């Protein structure tokens, strides 16, 4: 799947030396030039320089306004900006609108605050774009068998301790939120069907993995 990147998750994963999670999770990665040149450079020059190296290597594509014009979707992009301007901050706005106008499946952001972009997209207030935070990407790796529950927890703590020292996330709370998101009882039909399809394609027994996670979470 292809994704539009927000700046916060880029800073978190690059600062904690976990950027490979991006490249393992998505086929193609995009960022609008506004987020790249204005938001990312202002928030973390160190991350900007490391990120730029991957841009130069062709791992990430920076989309400029002239690119939107050449693709014939500049008007669409501007229309989404007008429609969503009251829902998001400027950086989030550009990232979500890029996903919508380019038909990208995923919006990747760690801005999971109440009424923030992640929650807005989880609730499907905007259609056709699924949000993913870094811990949800780790959750998918756990489902696929690439990480054990212990390893997932260790990866989570590495990211939060190195890049979120002021406002760290709680592993157990985030995992329970993720499980609820993708459940038939508490989640949306879209998310439940998507996770079931993800597991079918990878021959994963979702129930077995959920039991494994439940046992681990019960230990603390």
Image (cartoon, helix red, strand yellow):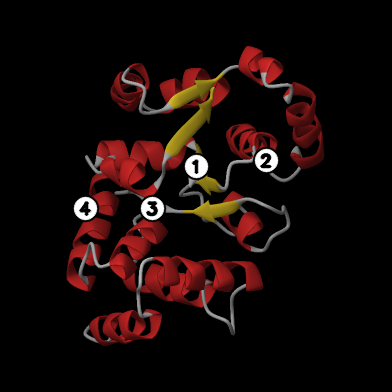
Q: Mark 3 vs mark 2: which is more N-terminal?
A: 2
Report the Cα–Cα distance between label 3 and label 1: 15 Å
Relative to 49, 193 lies left or right: right
**Quadrant occupied by the C terminus:** bottom left
Image x and y of residue 48, in percent: 36, 23
Report the Cα–Cα distance between label 3 and label 2: 21 Å
SS for dot 3: helix
Q: Residue 204, relative to residue 40: is it above or below?
A: below
Reading the image, the residue beneath label 2 is 100
Relative to 202, 71 lies left or right: right
Report the Cα–Cα distance between label 4 and label 2: 32 Å
Mark drawn on residue 63: none
Between disc 3 and disc 1, the foreground one is: 1
Please give the name of the residue rendered at 43% of the width and 72% of the height, measured from the top-left corner: 200
Reading the image, the residue beneath label 3 is 134
Relative to 72, 195 lies left or right: left
Image x and y of residue 158, in percent: 21, 53
Report the Cα–Cα distance between label 3 and label 4: 12 Å
SS for dot 2: helix
Report the Cα–Cα distance between label 1 and label 2: 12 Å
Q: Nearer the viewer, residue 37 or 58?
A: 58
Reading the image, the residue beneath label 1 is 2
Q: Is residue 115 visible?
A: no
Reading the image, the residue beneath label 4 is 158
Image x and y of residue 211, in percent: 32, 87
Residues packed near mark 4 inside 10 Å, few (<14), some (14 to 19) or many (20 plus): some
């Amino acid at each position: 799947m292809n994704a539009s990147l927000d700046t916060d998750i880029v800073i978190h994963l690059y600062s904690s030396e976990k950027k490979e999670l991006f490249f393992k999770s998505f086929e193609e990665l995009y960022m609008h030039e506004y987020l790249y040149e204005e938001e990312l450079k202002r928030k973390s020059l160190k991350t900007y320089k490391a990120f730029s190296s991957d841009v130069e290597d062709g791992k990430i594509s920076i989309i400029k306004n002239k690119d939107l014009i050449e693709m014939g979707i500049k008007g669409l992009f501007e229309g989404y900006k007008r429609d969503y301007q009251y829902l998001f901050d400027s950086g989030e706005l550009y990232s979500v609108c890029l996903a919508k106008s380019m038909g990208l499946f995923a919006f990747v952001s760690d801005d999971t605050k109440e009424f923030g972009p992640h929650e807005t997209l989880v609730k499907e207030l905007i259609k056709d774009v699924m949000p993913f935070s870094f811990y949800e990407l780790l959750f998918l790796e756990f489902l696929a068998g690439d990480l054990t529950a212990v390893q997932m927890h260790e990866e989570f703590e590495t990211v939060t301790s190195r890049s979120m020292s002021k406002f760290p996330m709680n592993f157990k709370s985030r995992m329970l939120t993720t499980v609820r998101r993708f459940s038939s009882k508490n989640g949306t039909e879209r998310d439940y069907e998507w996770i079931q399809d993800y597991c079918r394609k990878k021959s994963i027994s979702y129930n077995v993995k959920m039991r494994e996670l439940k046992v681990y979470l019960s230990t603390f």
